[in-house]
Amino acid sequence: MRIRLCLAALSLVGGATVATVTAPSATAAACSDFDVVAARGTFEPGTLGFIVGDPVFSALQRKLTGRNLSSYKVNYPADLSLTSAAQGNADLVNHVKSQASTCPSQRFILVGYSQGANVVDNSIGISSAGAVVGSPIVATLPAAVEPKVAAVLLFGNPIRAIGKSVTGPYQSRTIDFCAKSDPVCEAGGNDTLAHLGYTADADAAATFAASKV
């Protein structure tokens, strides 16, 4: 599995123009205090993502004591197809909008790793077009939902390699981890294994999120 993920990181290609994408119907979660919405990396196994999503959710449960947490795994291919990130973008926005309508008091923590970071970037209005496995924006969270997003946790974010970052209303609520020499998020990076080490940042990410709730 480790070898497969390494090969995936090395073989990623830049984003391309994407046609209109229709998101699958969102599945409502219980009306928890916080819904952790996680977009996994390319070919990443696990419930929410073995490298990032699962350990971050566990860390959040430890940090947000006394709070009820639910989770949602963004429904998208997470492969190298040209519409993969766009499908995730549409599904994430569809899910959060549905939850915000069903559970008006619920807040959200958005988690994105690698291609999943592109999914989150697009969903908060930062285009990942031109980045590794990126895409143009196909949907954004509406302004009415923006205050409900407590934190944005990004790991190995491909837009960083093309000189971009999260700006605007979500900037102060975003933490964006990029390991030294990770070629996915650092221009000129040459250590593919660095892209697989973000489990070590789960506790720091959860601590950041806890400071924003």
Image (tube, grey):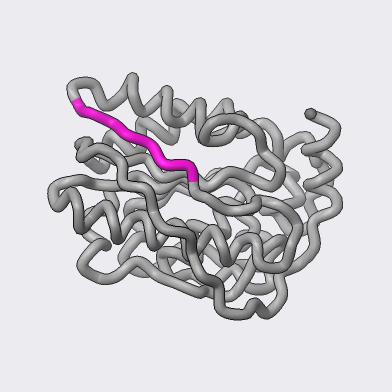
Q: Is residue 88 left or right of residue 175?
A: right
Which secondary structure type mostly characterizes the magenta part of the structure?
Answer: strand
Q: To which quarter of the image does residue 59 belong?
A: top left
Q: Is residue 102 left or right of residue 79?
A: left
State the image coordinates of residue 167 (x, y, percent, origin top left). 42, 67
Count of marks, rendered view = 0
Residue at position x 86%, y 42% from top? Answer: 7
Give the answer, above or below, for where 63 lies relative to 33.
above
Give the answer, above or below, for where 191 lies relative to 102.
above
Give the answer, above or below, for where 129 lies relative to 191.
below
Q: Is residue 156 left or right of residue 71?
A: right
Q: To which quarter of the image does residue 18 belong?
A: bottom right
Give the answer, above or below, for where 21 lies relative to 24.
below
Residue at position x 33%, y 38% from top? Answer: 209
* Quadrant showing the N terminus: top right
**The furthest residue to the front:** 25
State the image coordinates of residue 25 (x, y, percent, origin top left). 42, 58
- In the image, the segment drawn in magenta is 67-73
State the image coordinates of residue 182 (x, y, percent, origin top left). 73, 45
Q: To which quarter of the image does residue 71 belong?
A: top left
Q: Is residue 11 left or right of residue 109?
A: right
* Quadrant showing the C terminus: top left
> Foreground residue, 155 or 67?
67
Residue at position x 57%, y 26% from top? Answer: 200
Residue at position x 20%, y 40% from top? Answer: 31
Magenta region includes residue 25: no
